[in-house]
Amino acid sequence: MIHDWHPKCLIPVQIHPQKLPRITKNPSTITHMRTLTFDNRLTRELPQDPIKPVYQRQVANALWSMAQPTPVKNPQLLAYSPDVANLLGLTPADMQDSELIQTLGGNGALAGMMTYATRYGGHQFGHWAGQLGDGRAIYLGELIHAGKRFELQLKGAGETPYSRSADGRAVLRSSLREFLCSEAMHHLGIPTTRALSLVSTGDLVRRDMFYNGNPEMEPGAIVCRVAPSFTRPGHFELMANKGEHHLLKRFIGFTIDRDFSQWLAATGLPLDQHNPSPELIEAWFEEICERTAILMAHWMRVGFVHGVMNTDNLSIIGLTIDYGPYGWIDHFDPEWTPNTTDAQGKRYCFGRQPDVARWNMERLADALATLLPDTEGLADAISHYDHTYIKHLTQSLAGKFGLGPWQDSDGDLVNRIFELMTRAEIDMTLFFSKLAELDLAQPSINTISPAFYTESGLKQFGNDIQQWLNTYAKRIQQNKQSPKQRIEKMQAYNPRYVLRNYMAQEAIDCLINDGDNKRLLSLLALLKNPYTQQPGMEQFEQKRPDWARQKAGCSMLSCSS
Ligand code: AMP
Ligand code: MG
């Protein structure tokens, strides 16, 4: 049944409604979705904000508040991920079901669903920001399929008590970016939240994309995100900050029991869900540090830059979460940040990500310390972060360069080429694809010259890079592995296709200007096999085209989404 919710005072205006494509077959017929299994543990077991109406406010001593999606004018399914549908037990026929599509657009809820927003805080750009919370993500509950539990969330579904004077909505451009990138990350083998669907709402959203006082109306959209848990360090930080120690303990116990059950079983430690022991809290924190360090090594391996690594935008279970002004490294540059708001400070630039994640772990440690007799165990866990990151980074680098087992002296070799790549403006992804093709008997810069962005870079740094290639070839010859093994290893660590910023922007332009979702769907298919060369897809193996160098959405991203 679709619940009959009354729209708030909302006067939607349509732009090019006829242009947006849909893969909904027959939207005029309302079908009834078969029953799915939900088991909403979070809302059943954890304290609720007693105030029911949705208005923006500070909430105390509760983990969640009631929130219902605000209905939209005309939800249309623009794309969905067949893989995620399958994970949830949804068939292709289900994905055409009008009741399900209405639900994914925020017009109702299916039987068993529970709709709510959670309360969290966080450090933004290094400063405590107080209460934040799910301001535009509304949970649909916890779906159970094939013995697995998935939280579902609609991002952009309307106001909640945590909307902080904003509208609770999301624009199509940012929703498409989240939809595509979360799927791309998954297929790269990187832990991430997933995306089931991208639905256009038929309503317009007002955004000042360049923060220059010229807001414009843009088409709105909603992504249905899926993850075992959307919990963030910020959830725990806010409870600690407010002195809600009882709730903090309870939420840690709940999280360990629900989201870390396999890990818990492996530790053999006992869990009192209402009063987890200091020993368990410390061990659990070490596990969070480990997952976060592994995630950072992955991001650095593929050139992903999150863009807003505030403590509310990090996942407690080690997933990539909250895709906003993220970007992918084209020209290798540790100081590059995609986020216009971060252009000066560069707090969240590519090269600083591992340090920022560590800083975020320290903020989580501060919160947990309020429950512990001393901080020794927490400090050990932070050291564990450092060791884990170095271990996984060196493993990744050894794989990327095809070095065989990492040797201490490899650090200098690798740092030297990263420095040259930055100064000479060399494309990261293309460089590593080409490096695998290098003739080790006669290494030549010609093999990697397609990865240079400028002639002058090639001219100025050509000799240095040729020298580096000679040294590299000698180093590789110490390898115990065969040339074939080396190439296979490099290909397993170096994606051929990543969601370059301009590629996502082209898919957005096709959709918004021409009402064409073919580019979006072809990218979704391409990025499913990012490590394998795909015939006919050569254009996506090239470096960023010149026209995209300074274009908004392709080189710099705004937080406005
Ligand atoms: P973000 O930087 O996107 O992670 O958002 C920071 C905080 O602002 C979170 O609490 C979000 O829920 C909230 N927020 C961001 N955009 C909106 C919006 N359009 N409406 C309501 N809340 C928002
Ligand atoms: Mg966020």
Image (cartoon, grey):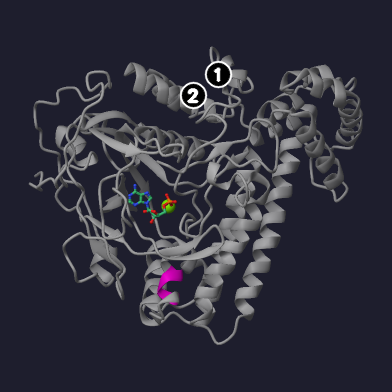
Give the magenta-colored segment's residue range: 236-240
Q: Is residue 330 left or right of residue 40?
A: right
Query: What residue did someone put label 2 on?
Result: 526
List the single residue furthest toward the top.
536
Mark number displayed over residue 359: none
Q: Is residue 403 visible?
A: no
Q: Is residue 152 left or right of residue 422?
A: left
Residue 13 place in picture, x, y as percent = 20, 31
Amino acid type at image mark 1: Gln
Secondary element at tag 2: helix
Residue 385 place in picture, x, y as percent = 64, 62
User: 438 above or below 121?
Assistant: above
Q: Please tell me which residue is depicted at 61% across the width and 21% down the height of the picture.
A: 541
Q: Quadrant of the N terminus?
A: top left
Mark number displayed over residue 534: 1
206 part of magenta stretch: no
User: 222 above or below 296?
Assistant: above
Q: Are marks 1 and 2 in contact (CB under 8 Å)?
A: yes
Secondary element at tag 1: loop
Q: Please tell me which residue is depicted at 55% across the width and 68% down the height of the picture.
A: 363
